[in-house]
Amino acid sequence: MEKEQSKKKFELKESPSRSSFYNFIARFALPFQRFKDSFLDASLYRKITQILNLFLAGIGSILIGEVEIGLGLFAAYGALGFLFVYVINQLATGFITLSVGDAIVVLVIVGFGFLAVWYASFKKHTKDNLFKNRGEPLNGSFIASFFIKLAKSIAGFIRDYNKLDKESDAKHKIFLRVSWFVMGLPLFFMNRILNGFVMLGLQLLYIFYMIYRGASDLVGLFTLHQDGVFSNATLVTGIISVIITIAFIALYIINIRTVYKAVDEENRSISGPGFKNEVKSLANDKFYISGLIVPVLGALVFTIIPLTFMILVAFTNYSGKSGTGGVIPNPIADTYLGWTGFDTFKRLFADPQNLRDMLTVFSWTMIWAILATFTCYFGGLLLAMLLNKKSIKGKVVYRSLLVISMALPQFVSLLVMKTLFADNGAVNTMLYKWGIIQWMQQVGWISDLDAFVKFWSTPALAKTLIIIINMWVGVPYYMLLLSGLLINIPGSYYEAARIEGASKWKQFSKITFPYILHMTTPALITSFVSNINNFNVIWFLTGNADGVADDTDILITWLYKITMKGVNDYNLGAAIGIVMFIISASVSLIVYQRSSSYKDEEAFR
Amino acid sequence: MENVKSKKVKSRSNQTANARWDMIWSNALVIIVTLLWLVPVIWVVLRAFGKYDGQGYVSQTFFPTEYSMKNFVDLFTYKSLRSNPLPDFVQWLLNTFIIAIVNTILTTFFTILTAYVLSRFRFGGRKLMMNIALILGMFPGFMAMIAVYLILNMLNMINSIWSLLIYYVAGAGLGFFTAKGYFDTIGKELDEAAMLDGASKAKIFFKIFLPLAKPIIIYTALLAFMAPWSDYILAGLVLSGNNQTVAVGLYNWMDVSNVNQFFGMFCAAAVIVAIPTVTLYISLQKFFISGISAGAVKG
């Protein structure tokens, strides 16, 4: 190590004495410095993968066995690269027209994403090669290792099972056989009545369900056609039947294992717990079963099934918009849905109107999410610091008054804000009274025909207002969160800084801000993601039922418009929903992977 | 006392001048900011207590020219249909209150229970469940509303406030992250000691964790109580006619075609609706802070 460092004097090195910007650059440049080592010491095969990886990010990782990460990176790299070229091409040929600002934002975000993916892939592959050069093994493919592990454990179980079968007496041999066909029945004879009863009952229920409707529901999922039934309902019942079947298969495996365990224990002359103890253990070491059953069922029925429905709808022709070839199911008119594969996604990307709408809406969504998060964060920080000053008396009063804007139900406060800035609303009336409107007419900012500022119908003005009003709603939240944190910063830091003669600004930028930022990075990211999905602020301020993407619409309100209001373009909405999911999921995934609280759950114990 | 202080300070008069200046401007700034924050609120309250002129939200003056309680009287007597058993707003308020209170109890219970189980038990599939919950949170929720509507329809619950309640409570388990983070910080010694005394896990939850988790319970309960007041999408989809929640009912009042008739009543309604929520927030501020810090701040 020593030698290496002395050899390369130009090498950037992180150090606490340097500025954080310098350290950031140093960290960023690290893979580039390491690349030479990782390349020169590698075998010929890995040299080729490294060169390939420079052009096709992710391919190199796939070739050296990091399959999933490589595939993910390659997919992201390809998709973003394609999108970048596609958008430029569409713009250049005049297929779609975007405003300059929107075009720049879209291209910058997509281009930045593209470069970021390339960098991530480069970094990972360089690191992997360094590991390999040192002879250390890599993680390898997760999925492959998962299946290998699974296969091993199944083989092990079968071996044990056969062994147990040989060792058992005739009675227990029959028990083991019976459990293959009748779930839980043998448990009745081994002092596990409750367990047996639940298993047997569920099997009977499943058989009854499959005969009664499950089988036809399952078929309905593929045909989407059950005479006299709305196709969308067929889709839901089909999903339900699939989920019930999966649950049944899982239960069947648990049944085999439970009977195996019971027989094994009987062979070692340990008797079953008995009904009373079984019930008791539900409140003790099996408490997780009784505790989670309601939440899990609830999530299954009202979150997982609906979301699966939404994803599937994107692949059907479920749409009420004319000219899309879509269908609104109605058995009386003999119309049923059908599967259409990726047609909806084609419609989203190849139709100039849809593509243009999506790109403009996407650009504003990103700007909105970034601005909304940062204005509220810094507004809250400033306010919290102001309120933390010793010289301010009656802090509790101020804080309570400021909290009002957060405590009001959003539809009340936002609708009020909407009316305040309406064309003939209070603000315009005041401006007129004070002569500002007349002055603006003279200057020529507003036409003589209007006696008001069109706050909501001038896009730039409306967007600015939305950000400001969002601050009104969101700043108190951060104020509360951050003022709690500010108090926790050890006072000794500031004392030391004061002795050193650090200015107020230095104290803020070197102590307060890094501390606060470090503590709240996860909160910032979650708030960024939730701002991407911030329906209320946009909808209550500028929502309308015209079914068209307006300038102030973000993805989620646009989605709401084209599905619930105006045109019932469900499959396009679902496709947009999937695109949105990919955006927020990739942001969140990066963050949760890095958040130490997720990694070290046990750290506090 | 005063004298001594001032003498001491005199020697560093420059600094005191600075400090006084600092005090003046920071106090002034706080007052200005707070006023700015309150202007819209005050405006609504004034409109509620002012005499409504039927001109929608057009108001010529900040302060109303004449004060009256008529808006409130109207609010509590107006029936859109003669046959309605209760005045519209009373019906909405009642619906929302029932949903909010039952939701508070059930959602809080299930959220805390899920958090406790996921924090304290280790069982197969636990990590998987947590990851699924995380992923589910990233979907734009209301995209699934069509399917939720269809399911509620199958359960024959359309146009009943219980359908909203079922939906809210069903989602309770997925909101465990904040509370789980809080429980993870509670040392395991506590459970172990209780277990040595022969307490069952269920007993530990009810007798030890619930009392300990007071701040996080209050935080969860506060959010659960607030949810029905702001939910517009599902309530607007599932409920119809006069059987509404305040959010949907009042939103419709503010529709362009209705606003002239209802604006005065809307302001009065806003004041009424704000009373419980603002009271709760202000009085439970302390718990709210500890809740958001536990949820948002992970080092």
Image: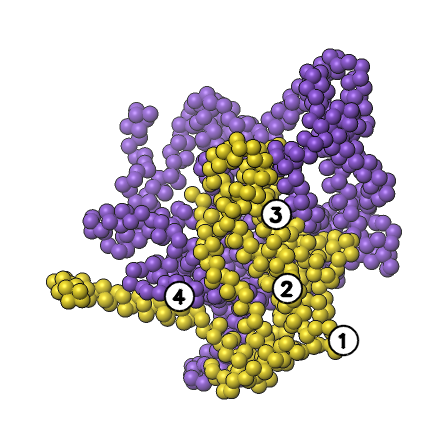
> Which sits in the foreground, A602 or A593?
A602
Task: Give SS at disc 4.
Answer: helix
- What whole-number distance in Å separates the C-alpha atoms at marks 1 and 4? 46 Å
Q: Which residue is mark 1?
A: B83
Q: Residue at x 74, y 74 (%)?
A: B84
Q: Are marks 3 and 1 on the same chain?
A: yes
Tell me residue B120's x, y (percent): 55, 37
Task: Give SS at disc 2.
Answer: helix
Q: Which residue is mark 4?
A: A397
**Label located before the other in sequence (2 or 1):** 1
Q: Which residue is mark 3?
A: B110
> Which sits in the foreground, A54 or B34?
B34
Tell me residue B76's x, y (percent): 63, 76
> Does residue A256 appear anywhere in the picture?
no
Identify which amino acid the numbered label 4 is placed on.
Answer: Val
Identify which amino acid the numbered label 2 is placed on.
Answer: Thr
Q: Residue at x 66, y 34 (%)?
A: A280
In this figure, what is the number of numbered marks?
4
Q: Please rate how many residues cluster around mark 2, counting C-alpha atoms within 10 Å: few if below 14, some from 14 to 19, many from 20.
A: many
